[in-house]
Image (cartoon, rainbow, N blue to C red):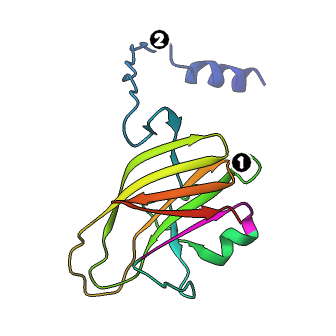
């Protein structure tokens, strides 16, 4: 027993660990996190389900439950991404979906305001590059639970989408 205690004490290193000061970079708000004066939270790691119909080049949806969400979106987990789970207790989810093609456009958010009962989302579709496969664009984001309508604005067109 004394031998074991001696071995244990002998294994302890008498060297003191040197503490180094770690500098934490300052995090600044960017266009990605805030547009206007309201919070914008994008959900990542999803794709538009194949059975979602497109009547035009860009479609919109706003949902308030996981069941409705799953009708439109599937999880696209890879080794290199994180899937952001929607929090339907506090938020609804809205989306801009670009019709799948071999030259899908990229969605650029230009305005985001969420106040009263409405959320206003300004966007533009940037030209895409030619692909060897069919793909579509998706911008999926949370809106406050109290918002019951979303106005999607592109150029001079406004489309109002009620939350389902």
**Image height check: is 57 above or below 90?**
below
Residue 135 rendering spot, x and y as whole percentages: 37, 80
Residue 60 inside the magenta-drawn segment: yes
Q: Is residue 73 left or right of residue 87?
A: left
Please state which of residues 128 and 147 is positioned toward the viewer in this rendering.
Answer: 147
Mark 1 highlights which residue? 145
Instruction: Give the number of the mark in front: 2 or 1.
Output: 1
Question: Mark 1: few, some, or many residues within 10 Å (few <14, many ≥20)?
Answer: some
At horizontal 75% and vertical 63% (from top left) the residue drawn is 65
Using residue 86 as the reference point, say whether residue 106 is left or right of it. left
Where on the picture, by quarter, is residue 137?
A: bottom left
What is the magenta range? 58-66
* Image quadrant occupied by the C terminus: bottom right
Q: Is residue 159 visible?
A: yes
In the image, residue 150 lies at what x, y percent?
58, 56
> Which of 94 and 149 lies nearest the eye of the viewer?
149
- Residue 122 image position (x, y, % from top left): 41, 53
**Which of the two discs, 2 and 1, labels the residue nearer the N terminus?**
2
> Can you tell which mark lies on residue 16?
2
């Amino acid at each position: 027993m004394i031998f074991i205690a001696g071995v244990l004490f002998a294994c302890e290193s008498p060297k003191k660990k040197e503490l180094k000061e770690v500098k934490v970079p300052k995090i600044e708000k960017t266009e990605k996190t805030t547009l206007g004066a309201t919070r914008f939270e994008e959900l990542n790691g999803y794709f538009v389900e194949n059975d979602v119909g497109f009547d035009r080049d860009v479609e919109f949806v706003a949902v308030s439950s996981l069941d409705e969400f799953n009708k439109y979106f599937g999880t696209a987990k890879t080794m290199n991404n994180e899937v952001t789970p929607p929090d339907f207790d506090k938020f609804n989810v809205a989306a801009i979906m670009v019709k799948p093609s071999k030259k899908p456009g990229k969605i650029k958010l230009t305005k985001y305001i969420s106040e009263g009962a409405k959320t206003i989302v300004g966007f533009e579709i940037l030209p895409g590059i030619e692909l060897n496969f069919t793909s579509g664009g998706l911008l999926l984001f949370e809106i406050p639970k109290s918002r019951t309508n979303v106005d999607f604005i592109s150029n001079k067109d406004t489309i109002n989408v009620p939350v389902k």
